[in-house]
Image (cartoon, grey):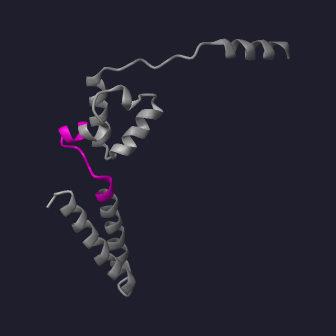
Amino acid sequence: MVKKIIQAVTEEEKPVEKPKKISQEEYEKKLVELAKTGLTAEKIGETLRRQEIHPKEFKGTISQILKKENLYVNPDLKNVQEKLERIKKHNETNHQDKRSKREKDRVFAQTRKLKIYHKLI
């Protein structure tokens, strides 16, 4: 019983190791790696914060760096395109679902509008 108490006290006194600071180049390499896995700028920021790397400590925002590397994916457009794919898949198996046909047309128009807005067309 006494050993457990002593072990608990000694474990609490151990200093917490701080993560090493990384350079700007290493930070940008890490961003590119995460972007190539298909993450958006917001998700990249979340994963970096979990790794205790704070983007505010480095120059340039995540989206600016990804645009420079031509890896930036607009999250709105990505989400709408994924939704369109899900609806198309549903439509293939359920031919009589007229509501989903209308929804497919609506979401397709939404993707076109977003592409025009972001000057991708």
Is residue 69 visible in the rendered structure shown here? no
Q: Which quadrant: the C terminus? A: bottom left
- Report which quarter residue 10 is drawn in: top right
Q: Is residue 12 above or below residue 110?
A: above
Please name whichever residue, 20 or 94, is drawn nearer the observer in this view of the structure: 20
Magenta highlight on residue 79: no
Taking the view exactly as shown, the residue that stands out farthest to the right is: 1
- Number of callouts in the render? 0
Q: Which quadrant: the N terminus? A: top right
Residue 4 spot, x, y in % from top left: 79, 17
Q: Is residue 46 left or right of residue 108?
A: right
Q: Is residue 18 left or right of residue 6?
A: left
- Report which quarter residue 62 is drawn in: top left
Q: Is residue 80 left or right of residue 13?
A: left
Please name whichever residue, 26 or 1, is drawn nearer the observer in this view of the structure: 26
Q: What residue lies at 30% left-to-right and 35% top-to-bottom? A: 31
- Report which quarter residue 79 is drawn in: bottom left
Taking the view exactly as shown, the residue that stands out farthest to the left is: 121
Magenta highlight on residue 76: yes
Is residue 58 visible in the rendered structure shown here? yes
Residue 27 spot, x, y in % from top left: 31, 27
Residue 54 spot, x, y in % from top left: 41, 29
Q: Is residue 41 above or below residue 8?
A: below
Find the magenta span and give its range.
65-77
Q: What residue lies at 68% left-to-right and 16% top-to-bottom? A: 12
Residue 64 spot, x, y in % from top left: 24, 39
